[in-house]
Amino acid sequence: MKTLIGIRREDKNIWEKRVPLIPSHVHEIIRNHPIDIQLQPSSQRIFKDEDYIASGANIKEDLSGCKVIFAVKEIPVQIFQKDKVYIFFSHTIKGQSYNIPMLKKMIELGCTLIDYEKITNEQGQRLVFFGTQAGQAGMIDSLWVFGKRSEHEGITNPFSKLQQAFQYASLTEVKEQIKAIGWNIHENGLDEKLVPLICGFTGYGKVSEGAQEIYDLLPVEDIAPENLAEFCQEKSFASNKVYKVVFKEEHLVEPVSAGDPFDLQEYYDDPQKFRSIFESYVPFLDIILNCIYWTHQYPRLVTKSFLANLWQKPVPPKLKVIGDISCDIEGSIECTEKATEPDNPVYVYDPIKRSITDGWKGRGVIIMAVDTLPAEIPLEASLFFSMSLKPFIPMIAKADFSGNLKDCRLPPEIKRAVILFRGELTPEFEYMNKYLS
């Protein structure tokens, strides 16, 4: 007997065109396993309903007969069905208040919740993610607004020809334009007001890798963080290059106790024993791409107080743009006061008034805080995501969700991602009870 699994339409916003499984992978799963796949109709997906029908799937509004239902983003509260298994990005594990009503409803209905974000291997590395695409789109949008801001300041620059990621037909198309911009810089140089153009990347994971992949299409020279100040003081830079600095944990924080050596594991285990030192690098940077994982137990990287002091100095700061890909509201970048969407992606934070104004005009630093960046390149994001999810589909379809978590026959990678099992928080996620009270 075949197992029926469902894929619901994405309707959180008009920008969400991603899919968890692409048509060719759906065809492969149906052909090789006792599985049928059913999708709700959608005119918004990056792939048409007809593509899924051709792959062997069914298009049907009612998914109530499906054993497991897959989605990308959060599911509206009224959609959940009793005892059903759902797999999507729930955005609940940090106690996000806006999704607590959804979590409570799932508990009430005895649902099982599997969160892609927690599908990991034994080393804790994520296996199903959009991080690379978030970095790619975040870098594109940050370069776009850097060009707009520079143009607004009367500085001619090749980035002014760039558009936002979602305005291109494909990632390949935007990469070709950035390569052309890079050639322009190599041949003609940048305006002296932009030299040296230095972009700093916090973190070195998949998000940072994606962002660096885009930036590296330009004529890039790397600078070690410890050499940044000396490099800027010596003024040995060129106008036909851009510069890149990648910051790891030892460049972002130091032990509070003076003289103690930095220990990475200690930082992960006891972050309150550390304080941020990243602000010492900020005056040398034109663009910051924030790519780190952050929770409130970790120190902030850029505070509002620091920015206020920076903007009170007689010489205007270099910093034009913070591409906050991590997008934790008032988190590691304290002046990230709200998340944005592609049609209104940026705002200026005025450090003196401590206020924000949509757009790229006015005193202060521009914050790019789109929290659905992978949706701006939905084709590539869906291809990448589906490839990583596909191997787990047969095992999820075979699982027994009627008994207990221990004996449900889920592979360990998926079992680690089970937040709710039949309406109860699993042991690893019992800490979330404090958010439910």
Image (spheres, helix red, strand yellow):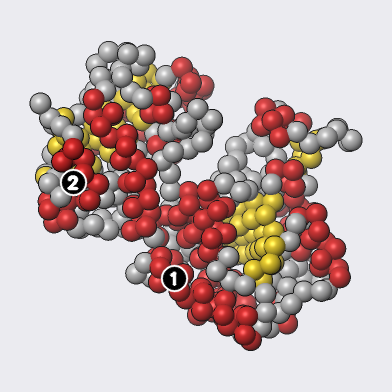
Q: Nearer the viewer, residue 388 or 424?
A: 388
Q: Secondary structure at mark 1?
A: helix
Q: Indicate the position of residue 216 as horizontal and vertical percent values.
A: 58, 65
Confirm or deny contact between disc 1 and disc 2 (CB under 8 A).
Answer: no
Q: Is residue 121 left or right of residue 396?
A: right
Q: Which mark is residue 27?
A: 2
Q: Residue at x 70, y 43 (%)?
A: 249
What's the CA distance linking mark 1 and mark 2?
Answer: 30 Å
Q: Relative to 126, say whether 435 is above or below.
A: above
Q: How many numbered discs?
A: 2
Q: Is residue 263 visible?
A: yes
Q: Nearer the viewer, residue 436 or 196?
A: 196
Q: Nearer the viewer, mark 1 or mark 2?
A: 2
What crowding class fits label 1: few (fewer than 14 Cα within 10 Å), some (14-19), or many (20 or more)?
many
Q: Relative to 426, say whether 271 is above or below.
A: below
Q: Is residue 329 visible?
A: no
Amino acid under disc 1: Val
| Residue behind mark 1 | 174
Q: Relative to 2, say whether 350 is above or below.
A: below
Amino acid under disc 2: His
